[in-house]
Amino acid sequence: MTWTTLARRARQAGAALLAALTFAALPLASAQAAPADNGTLRIGTDLTYPPYAYLKDGQPAGFDPDFMDALTAELDMRPEFVDTRFEQLITGLKAGHFDVVASALYITPERAGEVEYIPYFTTGNSIVRPVSAAPVADASGLCGLSVAVIKGGDVANQLRGTASEQCVADGGRAIDVRDFTADSEGTQALLAGQVDAQVTDAAVGKTAVDSSGGKLAITSTELLFPVPVGLAVAKGNDVLAQQLRDGVAAMKASGAYQQLLDGYNLAEPSDGQVALALGSQPGAVDGEGGAEGDGFSFDWRYLASLFGHKDFWNAALTVIVLSALAWGISLVLGMLVALGRESRLPWLRKVLDVYVWFFRSLPLLVLLIFTYNAPQVIPELRVIVGSPFMAGLIAMVLSETAYISEIHRGGLSAVAGGQGEAGRALGIPWRGVQRHIVIPQAFRVALPALGNELVTIIKLTSLVSAISLTEILLVGQRLYTQNFKVLETLLAVALFYVLLVTVFDQALKLLERRLDVRRRGLRAKVHAGLAQADEVPEPAARVGTPHAGEVVLEAAGERKSFGETEVLKGVDLKVHRGEVVAVIGPSGSGKTTMIRTLNAMETIDSGDVLYRGNPVGYRHTPGGPKRVSDRELAPTREHIGMVFQQFNLFPHKTVLENVTFAPGYLGKGAPAEVRELALAQLRKVGMAAHADKYPHQLSGGQQQRVAIARALAMNPEAILFDEPTSALDPELVEEVLKVMTELAAEGLTMVMVTHEMRFAREVADWVVFMDQGVVVEEGPAAELFGNPQHERTRRFLSRVMVAS
């Protein structure tokens, strides 16, 4: 990508952002164009805040709805309540979504700069504590305690500011203030023992205590931080403001105003309280100076200042640590879940299937709240989920493990099945095969999707603010609920997230490049001193081995079915030490299945498969044959090598690493010794010059020669060849057959399934002809090819010999 392209895309992104901001500003600029002249007064209120506003039988109830019902009756209007979360009330008012806010909105200087107030009652805050805890009478008693507050409330600033500063000045610790989306969530955390106290509006606190079943009590002796509360209208909407003032005055004259206050144990605000709450903004109540807030403006200077805000950077660090831990832990656990779902144990597969189904179905926000409040049910969990960070981490890991396990499952299914078989054929137990062969390849395949999930996790950390963890969004919400610079603050929040995602995204791309074997393979070169070693030496003359003597491998009456189809129907075979046995026959005759049973790549249904008289892949028990584990079978497989039709080299390892892997993993010698032996085997097959290359850089014939060297590196007593030349071009077949002929000349015991009739005739000592799952005829190569006794054998040979 050129710098010109980057610049063009940057301009396009900037234009799109400007257009989005302009579109967002349109309703704000026309907020004053929403007069209540149609007989309906639209009222913004948070209906999750009892006893001030809540839903009862589907209808708004509480002090604010009761007050506005009475006020609109005085004004001869019809109330229409618009349920809006507290932090969005001022923004919604300025955007024209409603005409007035009535939601226990405290009067503060910052808010007075954004809206025009009509004071209508005074309230304060109470301290709520468990009845079993020592009572706290005032803010000084909260020093060093964790305290739940509602997010966006002015009390949070009071506790973090003046009250905590006094605690530190007195030699104590600051108050640990924790923000919750709703007071009810803070009360739940208090009941669960996750916080020591709750400071909330006096009326709200009384409701919480009354509904706690005697577990909570208000311990403060007087109201903390008393503050007047006002109705809010958009600045410049003087007509509506005056209507509301006239309506309140009429309610006072009729006695309805005082009756409502008495019913909710509230008081009328005094001029002094209002003046104290407003600080330097007295005109915001009387309607003076409101024109300064008219229209829409974007505070670029404020936006820039947020990037120097310490709390944002601390929150960004929290997001980085939480995201990295959640992703990393889920990465490991997700792989274990994915592997477990492929287990042979039905009960384990079922349990993990249910786990994935359940946690993928459960909303993360619900899981976060349940996890954080779990100590209310199981107190012992408080040690584990006692902090918002740990509760958030555990909840995210539980959720993301389910999602990431599905990504891993896709990665595992993308790894060719022959990779695991190749590892097991070398005598590597299941765990080693997964760790060193399958998982590295699956991880490389799944990495783009895993990176995308990391981006999702970074963004999901914003939900952890629901349990009061101070992350980026919560810091922004604390700011804009006080100054109502919502767009500026959220743009800063967005840019912080973009920055974090960009950093992680680039790191993941770097990891992808490092894991890309095609890029690494570009650095591999043919060793100049070994250039001639690519040539396969001419094989030595071979003396045949009689079909007699010490039996190495044996099949006796073996049977094997796949579903309803019986593939092997009582096969008998003996392979003697030093003998070369060729198995020939038409496609579908069971040749490959038979040879794969000799090292238990395929299990048998009945009969016997023996290595030096011992069962391969099973043991005899009183209840019949019982399959053994890969760990028990691995030592036997070390002595029975196998070369596959599709090579099955490990693509993430070099040629040399392919050959050294099994001896090194199984401790067959010191690393230097294993390396020298591997190079010796590569020289034998003419591939030493390509030791540093990767499999994708080799031709098919070269790959098969490396596969032979890999099998030889384990120094097996016998090697099984499953059609080793069938996947090769005709011109590459000869080089592989030369290697096999040389091995036969060295006296290596070999069993091969092949369609190379000339090779079988010239090199094999014993030839077995199979058809339809049975051995039709067997005998010395010269006799079977020269004078076959069975009609089916003669017919087969006549066709294939003519074709070849």
Image: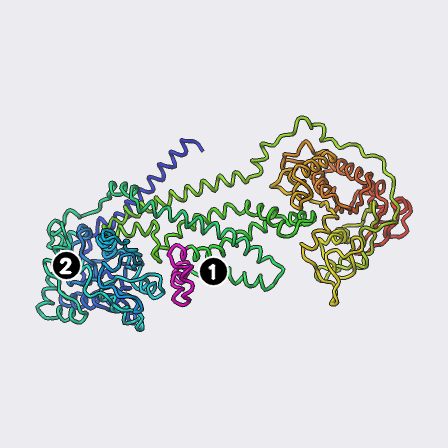
Left or right side of 385 for 585:
right
Outermost residue, top side: 528
Q: Is residue 375 magenta?
A: yes
Percent x, y for residue 635? Answer: 71, 51
Say which of 528 and 143 sits in front: 143
The answer to whether residue 276 is above or below residue 676 is below
Q: Is residue 650 above or below residue 536?
A: below
Q: Which residue does the numbered mark 2 point to in the structure image?
A: 118
Q: Main secondary structure of the magenta part?
A: helix
Q: Is residue 459 left or right of residue 37?
A: right
Q: Which residue is mark 1?
A: 359
Q: How many marks?
A: 2
Which of these two is toward me, 151 or 287? 151
Look at discs 1 and 2 and give the one toward the viewer: 1
Give the percent coordinates (x, y) of residue 217: 27, 69
Residue at image coords 30%, 42%: 307
Q: Position of residue 662 (x, y in %)?
A: 67, 44
Residue 96 appearing in the image:
no
345 with respect to 777 (left or right): left
Secondary structure, mark 1, is: helix
x, y percentage for residue 688?
69, 33
Q: Quadrant of the N terminus?
A: top left
Q: Which residues are magenta?
A: 363-392
Q: Residues within 10 Å of mark 1 (few under 14, many from 20)?
A: some
Amino acid bearing label 1: Phe
The residue lying at 38 percent from left, 34 percent from top is 8
